[in-house]
């Protein structure tokens, strides 16, 4: 199986992002000692997108691709304000807002103060079309909570952007769609695997186990002591 992309540009952007993430060692394969996400899923793979902030050339290129992706799939004049999700989404939201010449705010995980803006830092006027930005998503849980906070404050939140989407756990895309939230991302694990064919970043044994996980993440998680269904997973996102 390989990643499906809307266009050749999207595929090129995905592979470029994957190469950068591998180069800066943001990609971690650990089949012999699986990671446990806050939602309860077990995984042999983990992505540390926070590393991007320490590599200026890498982050500049990724942000360029992100803004181009948003323009192509959302529109160049369809966003009034960019909102980062606490904590990891704040720097990415700021860089994207700067490139889009848009105002920027951020949304908290827990309220501070009272009133409709208790979860929001910055000015987000009622009726503003917001783009919610985070570094990654696994099952989409945090995106829904942040979007709800923005909507309760009177903002329009129909789109969210992340650098990396796991693209394997069941129900995530559907859950976001049900909430009227369109997810835009640069790359997934399938793109990382494709780039790994170019250079031996990891052993062949590790790559085979990761592919096995990607082809059936539910069974893999259950077999390694994690949750075995979307219903069992707690409503949280590994980005937290």
Image (cartoon, rainbow, N blue to C red):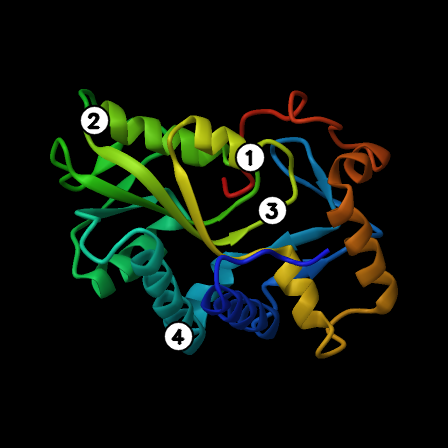
Residue at left offset 39%, top offset 45%: 87
Whether pointer 1 and pointer 4 mark residues with C-beta atoms closer than 8 Å, the reply is: no
x and y percentages locating residue 122 in the rendered image:
17, 42
Of the pair 66 and 72, the residue shown nearer to us = 72
Mark pair 1, 2: CA separation: 24 Å
Badge 3: few (under 14), some or many (20 or more) residues near its Cα, within 10 Å? Answer: some
Indicate which disc, 1 or 2, sits on the residue closer to the N terminus: 2
Of the pair 154 and 34, the residue shown nearer to us = 154
Residue at left offset 57%, top offset 67%: 18
Quarter of the picture containing the N terminus is: bottom right
Looking at the rendered structure, the secondary structure element under dot 3 is loop
Badge 2: few (under 14), some or many (20 or more) residues near its Cα, within 10 Å? Answer: some
The numbered dot on residue 153 is: 2
Mark pair 3, 1: CA separation: 8 Å
Indicate which disc, 2 or 4, sits on the residue closer to the N terminus: 4
Which residue bears the numbered disc 3? 167
| Image quarter of residue 22 | bottom right
| Image quarter of residue 67 | bottom left
The numbered dot on residue 56 is: 4
Q: Is residue 176 visible?
A: yes
x and y percentages locating residue 131 in the rendered image:
29, 45
Which residue bears the numbered disc 1? 172
């Amino acid at each position: 199986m390989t990643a499906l992309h809307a266009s050749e540009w999207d595929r090129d952007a995905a592979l470029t992002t994957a190469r950068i993430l591998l180069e800066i060692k943001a990609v971690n394969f650990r089949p012999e000692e699986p990671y446990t996400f806050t939602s309860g899923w077990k995984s042999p793979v983990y992505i540390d997108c926070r590393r991007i902030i320490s590599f200026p050339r890498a982050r500049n290129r990724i942000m360029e691709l992100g803004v181009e992706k948003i323009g192509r799939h959302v529109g160049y004049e369809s966003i009034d304000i960019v909102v980062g999700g606490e904590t990891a989404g704040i720097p990415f939201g700021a860089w994207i807002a700067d490139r889009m010449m848009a105002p920027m705010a951020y949304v908290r995980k827990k309220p501070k103060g009272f009133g409709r803006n208790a979860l929001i830092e910055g000015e987000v006027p009622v009726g503003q079309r917001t783009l919610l930005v985070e570094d990654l998503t696994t099952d989409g849980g945090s995106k829904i909570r942040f979007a709800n906070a923005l909507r309760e404050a009177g903002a329009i939140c129909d789109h969210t952007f992340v650098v990396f989407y796991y693209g394997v756990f069941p129900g995530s895309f559907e859950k976001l769609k049900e909430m009227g939230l369109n997810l835009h991302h640069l790359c997934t694990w399938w793109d990382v695997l494709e780039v790994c064919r170019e250079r031996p970043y990891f052993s062949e044994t590790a790559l085979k186990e990761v592919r096995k996980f990607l082809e059936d993440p539910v069974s893999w998680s259950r077999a390694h002591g994690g949750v075995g269904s979307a219903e069992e997973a707690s409503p949280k996102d590994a980005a937290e």
